[in-house]
Image (cartoon, rainbow, N blue to C red):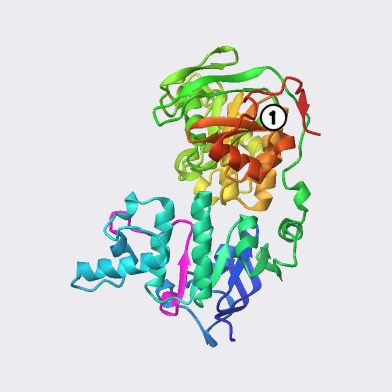
Amino acid sequence: MAPLIELETISKAFAGIHALSGVNFTLNPCEVHALVGENGAGKSTLMRVLGGEIQPDEGTITIAGERTSLSGPTDALRRGISIIHQEMALARDLSVAENIFLGALPARIGWRQLNSRARTLIDRLGFRISPRALVGDLSVAHQQVVEIAKALSRDVKVIVFDEPTAVLSTGDASRLLQIIRDLRASGVGIVYISHRLQEIYEIADRISVMKDGRNAGTVDPGSTKMDGLIRMMVGRPISQLFGEKQAATIGETILKVENLRLPNGVRNVSFEIRRGEIVGLGGLVGSGRTEVARAIFGADPISGGQMQLNGRPYMPRSPRRAVRRSVGLVPEDRKGQGVILDLPIRMNATMANMAPVTTGGFFRHRRERKIVKDLIDTLRIKLGSMNDPVSSLSGGNQQKVVLAKWFHADSDLIILDEPTRGVDVGAKTEIYSLIHRLAAEGKAVIVISSEHAELFGLCDRVLVMGEGELRGTLLPEDYQEEKLLTLSMMGSATGNAGPRPTEQSHGA
């Protein structure tokens, strides 16, 4: 059977820098071909070539046996190629049905027929979504379904999924993977881009690795272990994935939370965290993890309970007050809440603590440049200039800018909510090393993550939440995904949420 897509010796340069160098890629009918690599490896650029968004400098594109060139995205779509980007291209103020058929609406719309056709497509995907609902009112998972229905409405033969589960819950991600299996069974070819390697091994028929704009190899997931795949991507084994641990002495209690209650249903949450500790906050999406973090940071109101910070009463009424008390938050929504994308990198890095860069109301530009350069060197931020906007950086480097802000603020307590979401394996390792460094410097660190392996690899203990309650604690000897999920869904008397009395240090 002839391949659906053949990309041969594709090369592309921007301003003299080679984003792609002689890349080959094929996709067969009834196949899920995963494409992996670090941020900047060339994956998205290659798919933009396939989607007609950019023209290659060299190389050939063959679609269903016919060598061709693509004049633009519309031309690619006409040839049966649909790209579903991580940033979904939906009109939030239009209905589900209007979005599905956008670009193919007749001059005179028959709404009953349009809604009926939309419902048929959505039913085919196994979801119950009203065709009349506004897309802006839908969950992220349901917006993904609309994007897929939009592609199916045009009888596509190839669908590219770019980080489709990055913002989905575990249950929604599982349903999406089943949709992809059904699409594969119907003859559609799938290109699947993701940093979640466990998903890759669950869904892919072949895995192609890209590194520095070149092919690093194509492997069979059945005969290649994850350790080998990671080594192909970043040049080091999985044993080194969680970064370089540094010796950290467990000190006095930084934060003590007693019977915390929030208006959104979070209740009876009690725990404490000490200097030098990395404490995980685990559980299913919607269990209350992020809500607790936002309350500690003063972003959401508190309806009951008490907190102490450094031995003094603590009840923040705003993030500004939390920052003044030496609390920092790396939020789940990096782009919306962690950075100001259009502002320069240097301004984002110093905005949480202006005192070191001002004197008597005057801005000290030389001092700022020195501070930011030190932060860039410490966090290994890859950038052109500190005056460039944050939007010019890759996802991993944007996340490092958020971390730089709290390194500069010198907070005693730092909360990291999904710190490596959408970040490649290499950047993850660097971020993990930075988290260990914070603990070694005597900071208290809370890590919220939906990736259980991340919690187990980083944390001294994991507090498990379920349905707004703190249901127990896992210690390193108990680190199993089954135990975490059982606690989150059912609860168990697994001890309190405080530190172990004998715990004195971690790290190596």
Residue 68 lies within the magenta run: no
**Quadrant occupied by the C terminus:** top right
Against 485, residue 96 (above or below) is below
Badge 1: residue crowd in 10 Å (few <14, some 14–19, many ≥20)? many
Q: Residue at x 59, y 42 (%)?
A: 485
| Magenta range | 76-95
Given residues 337 and 300, the one toward you in this image is 300
Whole-percent x, y for residue 228 in the image? 76, 60
Q: Is residue 401 left or right of residue 75?
A: right
Whole-percent x, y for residue 494 in the image? 64, 30
**Quadrant occupied by the N terminus:** bottom right
User: Do we see residue 443 in this rendering?
Assistant: yes
Which amino acid lies under the numbered mark 1 shown in the image of this protein? Ala
For the stretch drawn in magenta, the main secondary structure is: loop
Whole-percent x, y for residue 269 in the image? 52, 25
Q: Quarter-wise, where is residue 263 in the image?
A: top left
User: Do we see residue 55 in this rendering?
Assistant: no
Whole-percent x, y for residue 379 in the image? 66, 40
Q: Quarter-wise, where is residue 19 in the image?
A: bottom right
Which residue is tagged 1?
A: 439
Given residues 402 and 163, the one toward you in this image is 163
Given residues 233 and 48, the one toward you in this image is 233
